[in-house]
Amino acid sequence: MKILTAIAYLLFSTIAFAQFDKEKQAVINDLDKNFSRYSELAKEIWGHAELGFLEDKSAAALQNLLKAEGFKIEAGVAGMPTAFVATYGAGKPVIGILAEYDALPGLSQQAIPTKNPVVEGGNGHGCGHNLFGTASSASAIALKNWLGQNKKSGTVKLYGTPAEEGGAAKVYIARAGLLDGVDAVINWHPSSENNASAQTCLAVKQGMFRFYGRSAHAAAAPHRGRSALDGVEAMNYMVNLMREHVPQESRIHYVIKKGGEAPNVVPDYAEVEYIIRSPEVEGVKELWNRVVKAAEAGAMGTETTVKIEVISGIYNLLPNETLAKLQHANLTMVGGVKYTPEEEVFAKTIQTSFEFKAPPITNAQAIQEYKLGFFPASTDVGDISWLVPTVGLGTATWVPGTSAHSWQAVAANGMSIGMKGMMNAAKVMAMTGVDLYMNPAILIKAREEFEAKRGKDFKYESLVGDREPPLDFRKSK
């Protein structure tokens, strides 16, 4: 089989590329023709700026678009009201595309190059998910049109995935088996550069440690109290000692969410939230167990009790170089983002707000060289990538030098710079889909790489266990 696959892949590499270019140009033309339509939708979702699991208007806008284009919509999947699957076509190959649309709290910002919120303390699309969901939907529609016009068999599945920012919705989609039968998954993310290299990242597990003690008057009867805050601080002290004895690539973050109401009252309740990261899932599991032991020891030593809730858990990305190199070639063909004179003024004004020397704005036009990479953060795409061969890319939707989760990103996500990068991403994903539909041998090669990297004994087990999606984690208390 491997010999036949290699021969088929070689044939793909040497056949008349003029035909492939013609087919790819068809989806590019389709997307160019609808630039205004998709830009308006992205701006609408940008204006909604809805938080995780609360994206009712944003999810509805994407569903309405896809339904009008002939997709069958299954809403409220995997126990999440704002999650959905939109399906078009029949038969193999089945290509999945991921779409996100949640915003972040506290990042409200107008689409202008100076800091000025729409609503003080309001929400904002600081990670560009208004662009993410729109571009993914646009690419799915372009592929739908291409399949129909060419009378080709194949299925497009658009996965509407809410609450990426802390809710890890893709974990529940993965756990629910909604990826069964999918041959490859394509996704992207807004960025300050154009990059389609294969990448991995940190696996992560997040949880709340709630300590319960006994209140008492801190001066008149301190001996009768048992401080829940003491339990939290004892735990934190032991974890901080532990930092010397963990792999250097690992990360441990915590924040005390509640520590009491008044200093003259022994607090009977306190809670601390932890995030544990490591390059591999097994490393996260090991570190989590050590942190749990510190919590139990802290409770024992302070004569309090502790209850632990797992909030989230995400696998590291499993890179697929077969698909990544293909997508990188398509990104190179599409190119980067070229600014108009007005956009250059916007970009240079944004860059004056940086506290470092900004890179040239022409970096938005450059394509980063292909390489196997690593980024020290986490994404819930990780779980998907261990179930199906998965590929991703980033395009320059932000002014070069912009950080994610910033007002500068929100500003660009709501104007033409963001829209141009968004449509470049839609083109690259659609072109990659065309490659996969026209030459399933690539999918066979990608699957072989995928299976080799996972290992023959791999069995997917969600890091969140059997907990239900945390639908209220962004609701105001």
Image (cartoon, helix red, strand yellow):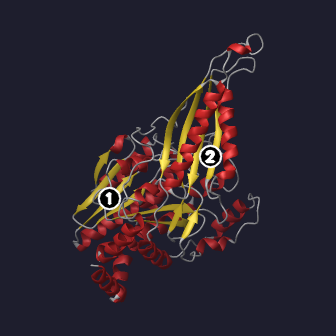
Earlier residue among tags 2 and 1: 2
At 34% from the left and 69% from the top, the residue drawn is 447
Q: Which residue is mark 2?
A: 107
How far apart, in angstroms, are the residues tagged by discs 2 and 1? 31 Å
- Secondary-structure class at tag 1: strand
Tell me, for residue 157, which label it has, or none: 1
Residue 59's disc is none
Q: In the picture shown, does residue 8 fall above or below 246?
A: below
Q: Observer-nearest residue: 123 or 461?
A: 461
Residue 200 spot, x, y in % from top left: 52, 64
**Residue 227 percent location from the top left of the image:** 67, 23
Q: Is residue 313 above or below residue 299?
A: below
Residue 111: tell me if it is visible.
Answer: no
Residue at horizontal 74 percent and vertical 57 percent from the top: 353
Place residue 293 in its image quadrant.
top right
Q: Name the amino acid, label 1.
A: Lys
